[in-house]
Amino acid sequence: MKNLISINDFSREEILRIMELAGEFERRPYQPLLEGRVVASLFFEPSTRTRLSFESAINRLGARVIGFSDTSSTSVTKGETFHDTIMTISNYCDMIVMRHSLEGAPRYAGEISRVPVVNAGDGANQHPSQTLLDLYSIQKTQGRLDGLNITMVGDMKYGRTVHSLLQAMSQFGARFTFIAPAELALPEEYRIYLRDRNIEFREKTALEGSLDDADIIYMTRVQRERFNDPIEYERVKNVYVLRDDMLASTKENMRILHPLPRVNEIDYKVDANPKAYYFPQTENGVWVRMAIISYLFGVK
Ligand code: CP
């Protein structure tokens, strides 16, 4: 029984297999390979893309979905523990997809559950299924995963998509630029991770003048929900706004990704620029999540 809790649970070969499977699902988007299976979709924290693309993927594979999109209608409101909730629901399904605001909650669920657990995002820690769809989007737009310049902008501190993506792209010899205000700089543990693997990276605070060598610009939202101090959030919330005029001197084949939701960090005029790829990226989530589910079920 294999879980997907961290992107490091998948080897380079497994990542490439997911890319291959996702391509097959994109070509044939309805394949009832999992008829009769039940997948529980447990979202203890809000979501649009991750929950609905997982549920779309489950339906397209012929399986059925049970679950909740918030805990207000569950016995969590009566004081039921996370442990008891997972112990119970793992008796009702063949796989659990879950999101939680608490870092480590999916790992704990994976330890006690009778069925495989997929982490759909835990606090500021990891978002491995997002990373796999990011990789699929990068491969589709760049024609390869190896040896790319990845520029990440925004919240390097609490951004779980950033943390998972830098670990995954480290397996493909990426060179990174991290652009963040001092308050949201990359945590030391990730700098150590990169240094230990001799991965080239630089850290900057200015967006202007930092984009021209990028193959991928990965924009992120400053996440209000991660701040204990609202004044600190107000200080940094609009620190970067990507505008169309900033893209003129970027590489022809550069593409802008964003895990979304967007708040203010990409001007709406950028949406019409051919370098904007964040909405096609959301569609890729369906193919990649079909690939993840069928791979974890061991479908041949
Ligand atoms: N990218 C992402 O995790 O979006 P949602 O929060 O809408 O699921």
Image (tube, rainbow, N blue to C red):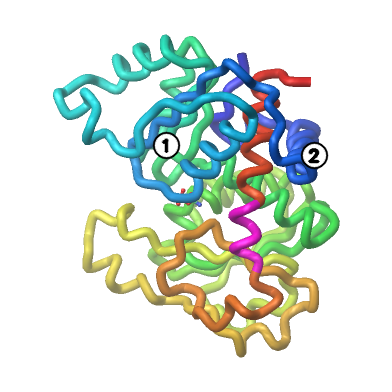
Identify the residue under disc 1: 99
Residue at 79% of width from left, 44% of height from top? 27
Q: Position of residue 207 (x, y in %)?
A: 55, 78
Image quadrant containing the N terminus: top right
Q: Can residue 12 be seen in this view?
A: no
Q: Residue 129 carries which label?
A: none
Residue at 60% of width from left, 85% of height from top? 244
Marks 2 and 1, how far apart in space? 27 Å
The amino acid type of the residue labelled 1 equals Arg
170 w.r.t. 60: above or below: below
Residue at 31% of width from left, 54% of height from top? 225
Identify the residue under disc 2: 24
Residue depth check, mark 2 versus mark 1: number of the one nearer the observer = 2
Label 1 element class: strand
13 w.r.t. 195: above or below: above
Residue at 72% of width from left, 58% of height from top? 200
Q: Which of 53 and 108 is in front in this view?
A: 53
Q: Quadrant of residue 208?
A: bottom right
Q: In this view, does 278 lie to the left or right of 261?
A: right
Q: Does the magenta stretch include residue 287?
A: no
**Segment tinted magenta in the rendering:** 277-283
Image quadrant containing the C terminus: top right
The residue carrying mark 1 has its beta carbon less than 8 Å from ligand 1: yes
- Callout 2 touching callout 1 (CB < 8 Å): no
Predominant SS along the magenta part: helix
